[in-house]
Amino acid sequence: MVDPKKPFVRALKEEIIERGKSVGGRIKDAITPDSSFAVGMIIGGFATVLKSLGIPFYTTDELCDKLCEWIKVKVNREAGAVLQKILSFEIPLINQKIFDLLVGFVLGGPAELIADTVIGTILEKAIMPAVNSVLMDLTINILMSTML
């Protein structure tokens, strides 16, 4: 994680805020760290440590499987299988499963779910391919210039 007290990060934040004011948006609110995001990052890192130590910590896919398996055993085998197919369905455009969307809705509410889905889709479909392309070109150019 980046230390917000470092001069570069502080200067970058101030520049973003200045440019945001000229656009008329409240970009300062958008880049202010969200406490729930920080807690999520800590829990995610903690989950990785727990899993590497062999301590059970379930991802959303594993939770979905466990829930559907419980329904298959306790309620009805066919109902559990149908529910697993529904909850495991990945929506093509946003590349998220229905169970992930339901968990996001329960934990963050509708506004958070919509914002996360839209931002995630924009990052995945538009920004990251461009960044990957630029980084790949840069890497190739550096490698080619060092070989010549």
Image (cartoon, helix red, strand yellow):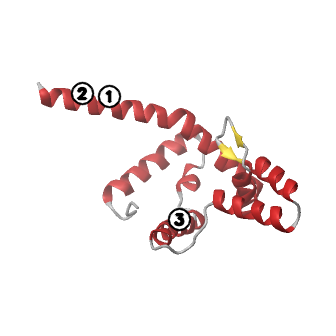
Q: Amino acid at mark 3?
A: Gly
Separation of residues labelled 2 and 3 (CA atoms) = 36 Å
Q: Amino acid at mark 2?
A: Asn
Q: What numbered label is drawn on residue 97?
A: none
Q: Position of residue 137 (x, y in %)?
A: 32, 28
> Front-most of 80 and 117?
80
Earlier in the chain: of badge 1 and badge 3, it is 3
Residue at the spot of label 3: 44
Q: Is residue 67 left or right of residue 51?
A: right
Q: Position of residue 38 (x, y in %)?
A: 53, 66
> Front-most of 27 and 109?
109
Q: Amino acid at mark 1?
A: Asp
> Above or below — where is 87 with respect to 124?
below
- Indicate the secondary structure of the residue bearing disc 1: helix
Q: What numbered label is drawn on residue 137?
A: 1
Please tell me how crowded label 3 is: few (under 14), some (14-19), or many (20+) other residues with Cα within 10 Å: few
Separation of residues labelled 1 and 3 (CA atoms) = 32 Å
Please tell me how crowded label 2 is: few (under 14), some (14-19), or many (20+) other residues with Cα within 10 Å: few
Residue at the spot of label 2: 141
The structure residue drawn at horizontal position 33% and vertical position 61%, both measured from the top left corner, is 6
Q: Position of residue 147 (x, y in %)?
A: 13, 28
